[in-house]
Image: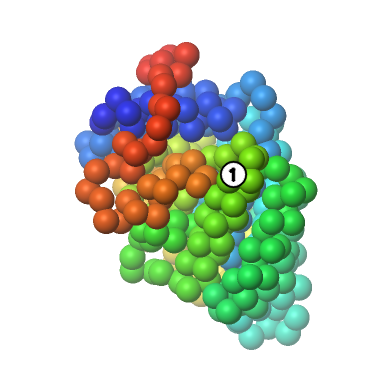
């Protein structure tokens, strides 16, 4: 792992109000980070396309952040109303999302009510809604989908549209003079950081299962997919269970071009410095 990458991830952790408590090099070189109590009170914005997205991809990390005292604001762009045939499914799924957020200790859940399986058609509305949320909460850290290098084979058009919108809004806010948010992009095939979620893994699974209307279709994900993915991420970073992210700064042009680059995008970031805690600090 290059020093630049270690420094980058550590800086990312610092901006999150998260302490870098040691790094271990996994067999495949995925940097290992653990979220812990930080000094300031960061506002974290977690943006999913459908009810259950955030629990599936980042539920453990969001739980750790809420335990550390961070305010975690959740945005769900659609009500997932096409995810079944129950009457009033949109209402059912909103209630399930709120129950899942309660399990993870997330403070606010904002529903945008945009069309399920139709986000790409309402890209302008989506970005306007995200700007409005940004204006309210001024997030220091944002979790959402990686639209540049998504992890195949499950690449959903709503996930792609949402990831694009988040990157565009984050970049626009940064270029308008706001402190650039640190982005944690999930569902990525180019992760550069992993979070140890072993201590909250049961809560992550419980939050996912709170989406009860989906469990007849999605229960199988809990075993073969969630556990296996967490185990593989963990193996790469030296943990038992982990969630993986591509961590970058809002507005970083490398985010857009790293698909074409064989070199880690973080090498393009200017101004990297070793954090005061340094590598391996407790
Ligand atoms: Zn989804």
Q: Residue at x 74, y 45 (%)?
A: 137
- The residue closer to the viewer here, 120 or 26, is 120
Q: Which residue matches tag 1?
A: 174
Say what secondary structure mark 1 lies in: helix
- The residue closer to the viewer here, 25 or 43, is 43
Question: Quadrant location of residue 118?
Answer: bottom right
Would you say the beta carbon of the disc 1 residue lies within 8 angstroms of ligand 1?
no
Eyeballing the image, is 76 above or below 276? below
Q: Residue at x 59, y 52 (%)?
A: 172
Q: Quadrant of the N terminus?
A: top left
* Colouring method of the image: rainbow
How crowded pointer 1 is (Cα within 10 Å; few <14, some 14-19, many 20+) is rated as some
Where residue 237 sits: x, y (%)? 32, 36
- The residue closer to the viewer here, 46 or 105, is 46
Where residue 206 sits: x, y (%)? 59, 53
Q: Residue at x 44, y 61 (%)?
A: 147
Q: Is residue 34 visible?
A: no
Q: Is residue 50 left or right of residue 29?
A: right
Q: Is residue 263 left or right of residue 257?
A: left
Where residue 47 sits: x, y (%)? 61, 56
Q: Is residue 6 visible?
A: yes
Eyeballing the image, is 218 above or below 41? below
Q: Residue at x 42, y 48 (%)?
A: 253
Where residue 244 sits: x, y (%)? 41, 45
């Amino acid at each position: 792992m290059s020093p630049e990458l270690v420094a980058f991830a550590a800086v990312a952790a610092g901006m999150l109000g998260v302490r870098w408590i040691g790094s271990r090099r996994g067999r495949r070189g995925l940097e290992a980070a653990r979220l812990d109590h930080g000094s300031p009170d960061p506002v974290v914005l977690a943006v999913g396309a459908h009810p259950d997205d955030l629990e599936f991809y980042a539920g453990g990390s969001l739980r750790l952040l809420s335990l550390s005292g961070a305010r975690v604001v959740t945005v769900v762009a659609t009500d997932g109303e096409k995810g079944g045939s129950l009457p009033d499914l949109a209402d059912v799924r909103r209630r399930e999302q709120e129950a899942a957020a309660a399990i993870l200790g997330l403070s606010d859940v904002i529903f945008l009510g945009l069309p399920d399986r139709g986000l790409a058609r309402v890209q302008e509305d989506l970005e306007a809604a995200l700007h409005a949320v940004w204006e309210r909460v001024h997030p220091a850290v944002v979790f959402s989908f990686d639209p540049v290098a998504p992890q195949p084979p499950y690449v959903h058009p709503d996930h792609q549209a949402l990831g694009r919108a988040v990157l565009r809004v984050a970049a626009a806010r940064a270029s308008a003079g706001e402190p650039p948010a640190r982005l944690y992009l999930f569902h990525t095939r180019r992760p550069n950081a992993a979070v140890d979620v072993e201590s909250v893994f049961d809560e992550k699974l419980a939050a996912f299962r709170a989406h009860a209307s989906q469990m007849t279709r999605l229960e199988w994900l809990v075993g073969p997919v969630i556990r296996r993915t967490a185990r593989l991420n963990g193996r790469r970073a030296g943990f038992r269970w982990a969630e993986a992210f591509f961590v970058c700064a809002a507005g970083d042009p490398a985010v857009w071009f790293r698909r074409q680059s064989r070199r880690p995008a973080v090498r393009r970031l200017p101004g990297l410095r070793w954090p005061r805690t340094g590598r391996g600090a407790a």
